[in-house]
Every structure is written in structure tokens, then in C-alpha cells.
Image: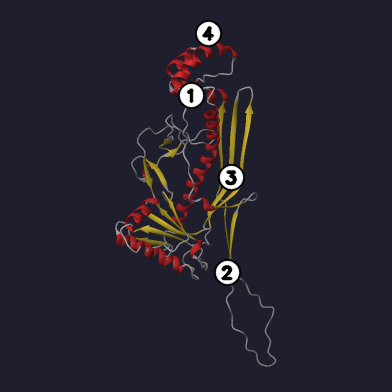
Amino acid sequence: MRDINTAFLTRANELTAEYMANNPLMQESSTLTTVLNQYFPNLVQRIGLTLIKDSGEFNNPLNFARVTTMPLGEYLQHIFVDFVDPEDFPQLEQGGTVDPFIIHKPFVAAYANTNKIPKNYSVTLHDATVKGAFHTGEISAFTTMLAQITTGIDKGREAFQFEQTKEILARYIVDVAADTDITQVVSAITDQESMIAFISKVKEISIDMQFWRTFYNQAGVKRAVSRAQLKLLIRASAMNTITNQLSTIFNQENLNFEVGEIVQIDNFGGIVPTIDGTIGTQLFPVYNAQGRHLRNDDGTYVWTETAGSTTPYTGAIVSLDTNEDIIAMLVEDDFLLIAEQTLELDFNRNARGKYTNFFLTDIAVYGYIPFSNAVVFKIAS
């Protein structure tokens, strides 16, 4: 029998995670033919069947924000045009005239932002490593794994866009915190009384938005919005409490939010990893040379106590929700906006190294429209 390395022998006998990851069985080399013949059947008997599980299906509930593309340019510009106010009809005496050259300026406002976020998603597939996990007869499992690995690139993009869109909400919440018309203070939903009060408040504002109002948007422009155009973004935990409370009420049809759609989300952004749950002990991500957030061997992310440092923090991590007092937002359906600039999937094949690199480039501009109505519901301190 030809010489074989010790690591390969040990891996064939023990099938540890380390050897499975670093020492693929079906190496592309004719020198291992004897080894494969002797050890591969033993490995197949031990595995028996390969089952594949991915990260699961996820439908971004904030997908409605993806409404346009912007292939060129740096700025995302929003323009608001107000309606024209009437003026008195001139009552002219005989021989009187009206100056036809008076300039009547319409009210037009403009806003631009350039919150551009470029991201790359990449994965390398080594032929030998992937093949080594399967019996040669498991063709369907092998192709399924390949499909799920490449699909995982798009899932990563979907998850990032969801989190980044919530950070846009978090920025808006800070921007309008001092505006008492936009930031509405409500009681925590703990019983039927507080639930009815919350629903009534949302309904009151929803109905009021159907008329010309200037105080429900950050720019202070006149807006009238139909019920169908409104979305209620609400914490899933709060919606669960409301659902439980509604189940004990007979006239449930009278308790509706008067909105076009209810969108449940887990939080409103502003989630900060900390050492002890206070903002003063915030942790910072550790990136590799390509700008990807590093992960530990168990899949968890690597954090550090000092921004820019590469020294990993190894203690317990406590997540701090800086917007935990935000229960919901009532927004127009065009309030959030993601303008895609580049979305391309490419790959290159290294024939000598027997691996393929897949790259997804996603460049988008994220923002919110200050001319759109958007009200924040905050629990009283």
C-alpha cells in the first residue's frame, strides 16, 4: 500500500469535525487511489445517510422598502410639490387691468441623502471538500448542498438588508425624538384597557392622516394619506399580547387599527452588543482583511472591547436594545426606500486548485423620505 499521511488515517477512523473540514476524503490525486479503495467503504458504512439543513426560510417583512433602482449617481433625491392655494378673483371696475406677469411661485421642497452601503458576499467551494462528505451515490444530496451553499449568499443579503432597514428606522426615531406630534407616548400593553387605548390611539392618528396635515412628517409639509397607504410596523411581542387580549373580547371587529397592512418585526434597530447591558460597555466587531465580520469556530461573531482592535473579547455578551421603548410605527408605504445600484452575481473557477469562488456584489442607497408621514409610538418611561 502506498504511504498515506497520518491525518488522513485518523480522520478516516474517527470522522472528527476538524478532519472533516480540513482533510477531504476524495482528494483529486491519483496517488490516493489505494487509500480510497481501502478506507472509503468504511467511511460510507459509518455515515450511512447525509441530511442537509440550511438557515431556513426568511421573508424580509420590510421588503416593501425595495421600490426602485438607481444605476447612476451618488444621491437619492426626494422632491415634494405642494398644492396651489386659491386667491380671490379680482373684481375690476370698467377699464381696470390685472398684471399678467406677476410671478406665482409654487411650494417645492427637495431633500437628498447619500447613505450608500456597498457589500460583497463571497464563498469558496472546494471540489474535494464538498465531495468528501457524500457517498458517490448521493447525487441528489450533493446537488442540494451546492444549491443551498450558493442560495446562502442571497440569504445573507436578505438578512443584512432587513437589519440595515431597521437601522434606518432607528435613525429616524432619533431624528424625531423631540417632536411630540410625531413621537407619540403611549402606555405599555399589559391588559385590555391599555390595549384598547393603544389601538384607539393608532386609529385616531390613522383617520386624521386622511386629511391635509403638516405635523405627521419630519419636513412639515401638507400630506393627506389614505388608509390603504398606511402600514403599522409593530413589535411581534406586542402584537402577540394584543392578539391574546383580543381573544377575550366579543366585539373584536370594532378594534381595528384602520391601516392597510400590519407588519410585525422583532425590533426597531439599535441593538448593541455589550459586556453588562449598558451603553458604556459596548463591544465592537472584529473584521478580516476583506471587511467581513469574523466568526468563532462555533459560528458566533467575534467582538472586541476597543474599536479597531483585533483582540477578541471572550466573556459573556449582553444585547442592549436601545429602542426597547418603541412599540410601533405608523408609516406611509413609501416612507422607507432602498435604491439598488448594483446587484451582480459572478464566479471564477480555479481549475488547478479545483475550487470555485462565488461573489455577489450589492451596492444600495438606504434612506427614508422626510415628506412621508411616519409616527413613532413610544412607551411612557
Dot 4 or dot 1, earlier in sequence:
4
Residue 21: assigned label: 1
Amino acid of disc 4: Asp
Image point 34% across, 58% down: which residue?
246
> Which residue corresponds to mark 2?
82
- Look at the image and tell me whether residue 48 can be seen: yes
Q: CA distance from mark 3 to mark 4?
A: 50 Å
Nearest to viewer (mark 3 / mark 4): 4
Dot 3 or dot 2, earlier in sequence:
2
Residue 256: assigned label: none
Rendered position, 304 above or below 112 = above
> Which residue corresponds to mark 4?
3
Nearest to viewer (mark 2 / mark 4): 4
Badge 4 marks a residue whose secondary structure is: loop
Q: Residue furthest top?
A: 1
Dot 1 or dot 3, earlier in sequence:
1
Image point 38% across, 55% down: which residue?
327
Where's residue 212, x and y in %?
50, 71
- Look at the image and tell me whether residue 180 can be seen: no
Badge 1 marks a residue whose secondary structure is: helix
Q: CA distance from mark 2 to mark 1?
A: 62 Å
Badge 3 marks a residue whose secondary structure is: strand
Amino acid of disc 1: Ala
Q: CA distance from mark 1 to mark 3?
A: 32 Å
> Which residue corresponds to mark 3?
363
Q: Residue furthest bottom?
A: 94
